[in-house]
Structure formats: structure tokens, C-alpha cells
Image: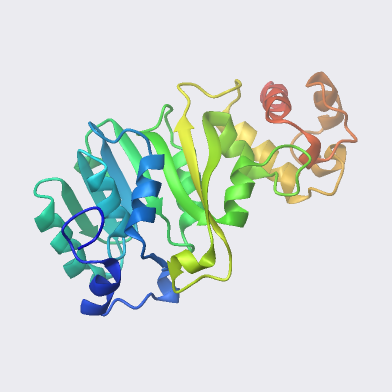
Amino acid sequence: MSAIDNLPPLRDVIATHELSARKSLGQNFLLDLNLTAKIARQAGDLEGSDVLEIGPGPGGLTRGLLAEGARKVLAIEKDPRCMPALAEIAEAYPNRFEVINGDALEIDPLAHLTPPIRVAANLPYNVGTELLVRWLTPKEWPPFWQSLTLMFQREVAERIVATPGNKAYGRLALLAQWRADAKIVLSLPPEAFSPPPKVHSAVVHLTALETPRFEADPKVLNLVVATAFNQRRKMLRSSLKSVSSDIEDRLIAAGIKPTERAEQVSLEEFCALAREVAKG
């Protein structure tokens, strides 16, 4: 018996269903149910919330989310081998767990969820960043989710919470911090997983803001930030020439020295520059 429910330990589940992790699917399974419950707790008070989970694998985090009181968990799993193991969890938690076999990049989960909605996932390494960017850049804000509690490689987690002047600071930090509060809440060593990855991992918790932190047009801001960091070693007056013919004047109007480089510029300054560029 495991520590959080009456289902078998995860090692037994993996052995029974022959679920060896596949590198092609970015799979690294967490086996410690006490640890998956700890991650679930980082998502906040789950009672009264639906939770979207991507890549549940054998269901370790799923069980943690359900044990922590999630009203419903919707899991999207690409690997059909995992479906029998997940079906056992559905039996143990009647009417509270639904699983869809498919690609999270192609499925709209909202028809299966009722607000308030939180997202919690040990994201497959090969799609984690793409999913995060999608969740941070919807057409309308606030988004469908209240919070994101996501496992990444430590390096990616540090990029999400990075500040100006830090090597990790870039487009991902600005995207995340413009519309959300982001913090690393848990670090995990390779040996917490099966198979152990070559890198450390970390859980990032992001809470959606009602409105973006500073005013800016999303498309213009994204253009300015992406262009600036595409040539991050160049001075902004050079790297941003393609954005505006009089970029030096616009930088000065935004309160930014034209000789600064992208990694020295704060979120507030990038938003100010986006407003200047948007004037046409």
C-alpha cells in the first residue's frame, strides 16, 4: 500500500504494465508518491478546482492531485501504454478523473474542464517550453488558468524567473513575468526520476495576474523582445534597427540608453519601448 491511497506503489504499476520510460516521448517518471503529493500541494488549494495535467505517465502526480482534493483532474497522455494504469486510477476516484489519449499540442482541453482551472504537470521535456509559451500568450487575458505548477529542467526553470543582468534572462522570463508571478518552489535531483535525467529539475509555480504588469501591445512587445534577444550581444540601437527606422529616438523616449544590451533592460523598460514603437 502506498502512503497516499490504496493503489499499488508506482514501481509495481510500472512493472505490471511494462511502462519503461521512452526518451522519444520525453518521459522521466517520478516514483516517490510522497514527492508527487508534495508537488501537488505546491499548486495551492485544489478543492473546488479542476486541474489539467499533461503527460501523467503511470499517474504519480495524478494520484497526488486527487489525494490533495482536486475536484477533477483531466490528464492528456500521448503514450497509449499508460492508459490501463490510468484507468485503474479512474476506478479508484470515481467521477473525478478523466484521461484523453492524444497530443497535448493538438487537443483543446477546455470542453472537459470547469473553472476555476489550475494546471499541474511534470511536463515532458520535449514539449514543456512550447506549452508554457502557449499558456502565457492566449488571445485574451486573463487566461483560462489561475495557476501553473510545472516541472522543468532546472535550466529552463531559471530562465522563467531570471532578472536583468542574469545570463538566463531572456524572452521566456519577460513573457512569464509580464502576466504572472513566477517562482521556483521545489528542486529535484536526477535520482528522483526513473530513468534519471542528466540534469536537475525544478518546479515553477506561476499565478496569473488579472492584467499585465505594464501596459503594452502583446504583438509589439513580443516583436521587440524577440528581436532584441535574437542578437543579445549587440547594442539595442543596432539589434533593433529592423523594428523601427528611428529606433534610437524611440529608445531614448522610453528611457533606455541606445547602447544598452537586451539582457540589461527591465520588463518595465521593454513595455515602455513597445508603447513607443506602437506609435508608428
**Residue at figure coordinates x 19%, y 54% from the top left:** 5
**Quarter of the view holding residue 50:** top left
Looking at the rendering, in which quadrant would you find the N terminus? bottom left
Percent across and percent down for residue 279 are: 69, 21
**Residue at figure coordinates x 35%, y 54% from the top left:** 34
State whether residue 37 is above or below residue 127: above
The reply to whether residue 13 is in sight is: yes
**Residue at figure coordinates x 41%, y 70% from the top left:** 25
The reply to whether residue 137 is in sight is: no
Looking at the rendering, in which quadrant would you find the C terminus? top right
Q: Is residue 153 left or right of residue 259?
A: left
**Residue at figure coordinates x 28%, y 30% from the top left:** 116
State whether residue 60 is above or below residue 208: below
Q: Which of 130 and 167 lies nearest the eye of the viewer?
A: 167
State whether residue 55 is above or below residue 18: above
Q: How many numbered discs sit on the rendered protein?
A: 0
Percent across and percent down for residue 176 are: 56, 38
Q: Is residue 68 left or right of residue 253?
A: left
**Quarter of the view holding residue 242:** top right
Percent across and percent down for residue 258 are: 88, 32
**Quarter of the view holding residue 30:** bottom left
Q: Which of 93 and 144 lies nearest the eye of the viewer?
A: 93
Percent across and percent down for residue 197 are: 52, 70
Type of colouring: rainbow
